[in-house]
Amino acid sequence: MNIVIVGATGNVGRKTLEVLEKKEIVIDNLFLVASSKSVGKKIAFKKKQLEVLDLKNFDFSKVKIAFFTAGGKISEKFAEIAAKDCIVIDNSSFFRMDPEVPLIVPQVNAIDLKNIKKNIIANPNCSTAQLAIVLKPLHDLFSIKRIVVSTYQSVSGAGKASMDELMEQTKLVLEGKNIESKNFTKQIAFNVIPHIDEFSNDGYTKEELKMTNEIKKILDSKIDLTATCVRIPVSISHSESVNIEFEKSFNLNEIRKALENFEGCKVIDERLDGGYSTPIEAEGKNETFISRIREDKTLKNGLNLWIVSDNLLRGAALNAVEIAESLVRNNFYGK
């Protein structure tokens, strides 16, 4: 088994490397590739120092699986080239809505891996991935009709430069100095910004539309979803306030049991001070944490949830590696 990580020096690339190091996938050769400016850098993996290679010159026939973690422009340019020789697991948004490319959260719709046509599999948006894993067991039992979600997304979702800017701005605020935003539309330190990605003509941002379209593709096209996506001054982990309207009636014990028994979910729901999960507790953890489980008393068959997950893990690297594990378990049946 030979594997390559494209964009190995970025946030998600490095996190993918960390996940692979902890997983049981047997890797004969791991290749790390990136842009020419990173060529020659050394990155540790299982007590070895691997040298970063140039993406433009890499021969994808050497590998079985290619993780693309370098963004949409790189995926657009190189993913289909790579897919001629190997299976591509793409973390960007470029192929997600392609009808010939399965969009996968393994715990939710691994069965769709049977429908690989281009040798490309798409990883969902980070905020979608953690939501889908919570919705799946509830939808199976009670049939979801409508979802209203507000996200509270960490700056790591916008890349390392944005993480660095949060730290720099925080220091400047505490020192009483002026701030000039570089990667955000407004000051992010000690602030929240109700704007992620570009605006569409209807007033929604692309981030909000991604959630709507991706949940429909992954889970059920009949589900209605509306979202407001907000960037907050937190380094890692996305939080979501979720309101769900079901077709069927439920009780809270059934909800908790369904979530507790579903792979990848962990319920932290005590009705007392601190009896809930926050971004700090989720950082570095594989699970999606569910708290504040309660009925919406204004709506028939309505439920409120608070969910938190490490966006670099569950929302990106971990989900991608679990896709690879699904392929290995099923003997690359999409190849």
Image (cartoon, rainbow, N blue to C red):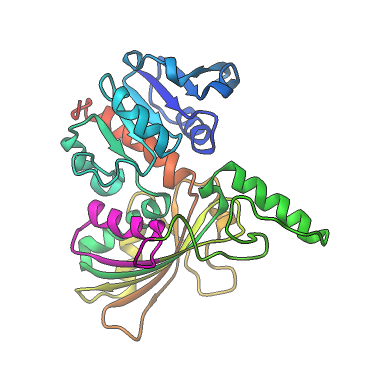
Choose top left, top right, bottom left or bottom right for residue 228. Answer: bottom left
Q: Is residue 261 visible?
A: no
**Residue 249 seen in render:** yes
At x 51% / y 25%, what residue is drawn?
A: 35
Please state which of residues 233 and 294 is positioned toward the viewer in this rendering.
233
Residue visible at 37% across and 61% down in the picture = 200
Query: Residue drawn at (36%, 80%), measured in percent from left and top?
Result: 296
Front residue (pair 146, 174):
174
Query: In the orientation shown, which residue stands out farthest toward the bottom?
Result: 298
Above-or-below relation of 333 to 323? above
Image quadrant in which you'd find residue 335: top left
Q: Nearer the viewer, residue 299 or 127?
A: 127
Q: Position of residue 177 (x, y in %)?
A: 81, 59
Q: Position of residue 75 (x, y in %)?
A: 37, 33
The part of the chain drawn in magenta is: 200-227
In the image, residue 56 lies in the stretch drawn in magenta? no
Judge from the rendering whether residue 277 lies leftward or rightward of residue 62; answer left or right.
right
Toward the front, the furthest residue is 201
Percent x, y for residue 207?
Answer: 41, 56
Quarter in which the N terminus is drawn = top left
Residue 322's place in the image compared with 222, above or below, is above
The answer to whether residue 70 is above or below residue 34 is: below
